[in-house]
């Protein structure tokens, strides 16, 4: 084998050397001279010796030229021939992909799933590689870093050590990039002792999601070769199966409290290349290990996901102190088991605490409508309300037990009360302003708006009336798509009827600041005349939402028996308390439970594309079904150094003989 076989085409140039030699033998014109008769007789006596020397000179020149060409072609020796040139002890470096996609099951001869896994094929391939090897060393590196073995001698004890580890190996539940595993192989070859020859075996399932950028792999392959190693890439599977994955499981927006029906949103991905006969998928919902409900959902199309997410109701009992609920959504069994379940760890309060602040003079009137909507008597809504006057805000830590505060047509506040509200919202709390006839415009402008740096989102201009419209059917309120107003989007004609029945008589006009930053206040609803009615503003880690009309039916009729009012108040409380309710466990508690759903994409990379990308570096991709350990995979030793030594000897001999012939 030659590194540069194209150079062998220069070997016919040896004929030029022969031609030059023959021309030199006949380039003199024959002339008879009496004085040379004596010399001619002497030449005839030594002619045989001279001819032999000339023949030897010709052979040396031909051999020197041939060796020079062969040396540049870089021939490699293998097997017994390599041993003559000092072949090194083999160091077998096994790079084994153990990401959880390797838990994909294999097929039998009829194409049915078996209990064996692709990872098991990889382990058996390692056994084949070392079978009958009684010398050398082996290193096994997995993509997860588990069960790694370094420099195990292939003697009787080493074989037993390796077998003990292989028998216990299982795929990890991690999602790893095979490119990083190949890069680790480069470093192992780089650090390989000089007395060992590195023989690298790369074992993987070659999934589509990992092989979209072949240039990275080609670079690592070339690095291994340049460092003196050789590589065999072995594909451990050629079968594609349907695999469903629970990609996401999370609580939907809403009031999250014990004994209140909450909603879970689940996204299921279908990692398949063809449609299945059964177009439904069965899911089971477990709470603390007990089956709570079963559902049947439409199967997403191949390569697709459930859109919108599958929505499932759930109800949790009140936790004991420090306890959390473990929620599990489980799919029916398929090719890969690791991604058939997804977990969510929850700790929900017994109720969400909301503070209603109203002046004593109108506390009953302002608060009763909001209180009836959020926590109606005799109904478990998950919201616990408390009504207090503005002076309550000046007490130390007055807001520590609340998740949201509703300010109901409040007059001027003391500076300490404003500071308490600012600290509350900055820490992630939610604050609602409702205006009304008692609102102090001057105080709002100076104490709450503060030229755009305060809690209030816009500069108030004063009380205005909305002229009635008797000719058109345009509702007085035009809401934007926002969680607070989700009732009016996708709810059908009945929802819009509820909205059309709302009549706004008065509102607080306000001038919106220039939208020069990404955190500028956002208008969530406008009036029929285009004036802003509901505005949201981010403040620290929290947010404020301002209704430029009253919560009680003073400036509008919304609170008088309109079911939409109740829904919007509950959505408002849910939206504002999202940052303050301790529902989800910390990330560290969830990490060990859930796998990376993207690793469940077990669709295979296209063999033709991989082969074509590797063709430029003459690197074959082998299939495990045809894998043979005796298929001439050895690290071939270059004999160019020996050829250089031979070239020097030939040149020295040629110079010596040429000098003798010139005497």
Image (spheres, rainbow, N blue to C red):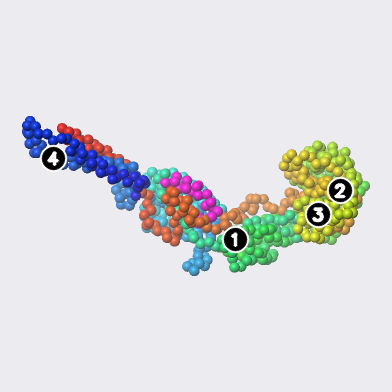
Residue span colored magenta: 201-225
Q: Kindly report the distance in space between the C-alpha atoms of the residues bearing marks 2 and 3.
A: 14 Å
Q: Kindly report the distance in space between the C-alpha atoms of the residues bearing marks 4 and 3.
A: 117 Å
In front: mark 2 or mark 1?
Answer: 1
Provide the secondary structure element on which disc 1 rests: loop
Q: Badge 4 is on which residue? A: 49
Q: Badge 3 is on which residue? A: 568
Q: Badge 2 is on which residue? A: 549
Which residue is located at x 21 percent, y 39 percent? 23
Horizontal side of 402 relative to 120 (left or right) equals right
Q: Quadrant of the C terminus?
A: top left
Provide the secondary structure element on which disc 3 rests: helix
Horizontal side of 243 relative to 156 (left or right) equals right
Is 279 rendered above or below residue 404?
below
Q: Kindly report the distance in space between the C-alpha atoms of the residues bearing marks 2 and 1.
A: 50 Å
Horizontal side of 369 relative to 99 (left or right) equals right
Is mark 4 in CB contact (under 8 Å) with mark 1? Answer: no
Q: Depth check: give the residue in front, 200 or 76.
A: 76
Q: Earlier in the sequence, mark 4 or mark 1?
A: 4
Question: In the rendered structure, does residue 223 fall within the stretch colored magenta?
Answer: yes
Q: How crowded is mark 3: few (under 14 residues within 10 Å), some or many (20 or more)?
A: some
Q: Badge 1 is on which residue? A: 302
The spot of residue 138 in percent (x, y) is: 42, 52
């Amino acid at each position: 084998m030659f590194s540069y076989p194209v150079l062998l085409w220069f070997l016919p140039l040896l004929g030029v050397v022969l031609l030059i030699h023959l021309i030199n033998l006949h380039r003199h014109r024959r002339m008879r001279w009496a004085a040379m008769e004596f010399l001619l007789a002497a030449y005839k006596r030594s002619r045989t010796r001279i001819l032999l020397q000339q023949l030897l000179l010709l052979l040396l020149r031909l051999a020197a030229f041939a060796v020079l060409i062969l040396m540049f072609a870089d021939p490699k020796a293998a097997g017994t021939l390599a041993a003559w040139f000092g072949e090194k002890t083999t160091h077998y470096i096994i790079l084994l992909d153990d990401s959880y996609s390797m838990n994909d099951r294999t097929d039998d001869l009829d194409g049915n799933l078996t209990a064996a896994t692709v990872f098991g094929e990889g382990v058996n391939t390692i056994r084949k590689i070392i079978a009958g090897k009684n010398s050398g060393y082996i290193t096994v590196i997995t993509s997860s870093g588990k069960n790694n073995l370094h420099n195990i001698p292939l003697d009787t004890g080493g074989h037993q050590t390796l077998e003990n580890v292989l028998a216990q190996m299982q795929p990890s539940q991690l999602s790893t990039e095979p490119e990083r595993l190949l890069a680790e192989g480069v470093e192992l070859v780089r650090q390989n002792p000089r007395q060992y020859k590195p023989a690298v075996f790369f074992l993987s399932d070659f999934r589509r999601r990992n092989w979209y950028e072949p240039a990275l792999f080609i670079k690592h392959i070339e690095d291994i070769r340049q460092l003196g190693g050789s590589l065999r890439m072995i594909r451990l599977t050629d079968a594609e199966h349907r695999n469903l994955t629970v990609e996401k499981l999370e609580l939907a927006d809403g009031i999250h409290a014990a004994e209140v029906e909450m909603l879970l949103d689940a996204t299921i991905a279908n990692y398949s290349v063809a449609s299945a006969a059964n177009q439904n998928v069965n899911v089971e919902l477990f709470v603390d290990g007990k089956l709570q409900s079963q559902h049947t959902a439409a199967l997403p199309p191949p390569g697709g996901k459930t859109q919108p997410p599958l929505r499932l109701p759930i109800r949790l009992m009140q936790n004991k102190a420090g306890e959390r609920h473990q929620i599990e959504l489980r799919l029916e069994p398929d090719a890969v088991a690791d991604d058939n379940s997804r977990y969510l760890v929850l700790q929900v309060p017994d109720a969400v605490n909301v503070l209603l602040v109203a002046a004593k003079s109108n506390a009953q009137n302002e608060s009763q409508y909001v209180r009836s909507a959020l926590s109606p008597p005799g109904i478990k809504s998950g919201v616990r309300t408390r009504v207090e006057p503005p002076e309550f805000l000046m007490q130390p830590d007055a807001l520590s037990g609340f998740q949201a505060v509703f300010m109901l047509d409040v007059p001027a506040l003391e500076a300490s009360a404003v500071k308490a509200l600012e600290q509350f919202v900055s820490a992630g709390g939610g604050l609602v302003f409702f205006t009304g006839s008692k609102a102090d415009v001057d105080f709002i402008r100076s104490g709450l708006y503060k030229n755009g740096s305060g809690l209030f989102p816009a500069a108030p201009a004063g009380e205005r009336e909305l002229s009635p419209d008797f000719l058109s059917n345009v509702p007085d309120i035009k809401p934007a798509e926002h969680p607070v107003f989700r009732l009016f989007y996708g709810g059908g004609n009945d929802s819009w009827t509820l909205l059309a029945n709302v009549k706004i008589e008065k509102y607080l006009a306000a001038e919106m600041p220039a939208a020069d930053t990404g955190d500028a206040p956002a208008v969530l609803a406008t009036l029929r005349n285009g004036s802003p009615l509901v505005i949201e503003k981010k403040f620290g880690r929290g947010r404020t939402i301002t209704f430029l009309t009253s919560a009680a039916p003073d400036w509008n009729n919304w609170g008088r028996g309109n079911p939409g009012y109740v829904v919007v108040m509950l959505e408002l409380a849910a939206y504002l308390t999202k940052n303050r309710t301790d529902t989800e466990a910390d990330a560290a508690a969830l990490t060990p439970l859930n796998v990376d759903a993207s690793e469940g994409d077990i669709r295979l990379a296209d063999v033709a594309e991989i082969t074509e990308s590797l063709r430029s570096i003459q690197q074959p991709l082998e299939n495990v079904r045809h894998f043979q350990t005796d298929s001439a995979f050895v690290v071939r030793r270059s004999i160019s150094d020996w050829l250089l030594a031979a070239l020097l000897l030939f040149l020295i001999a040629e110079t010596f003989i040429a000098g003798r012939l010139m005497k």
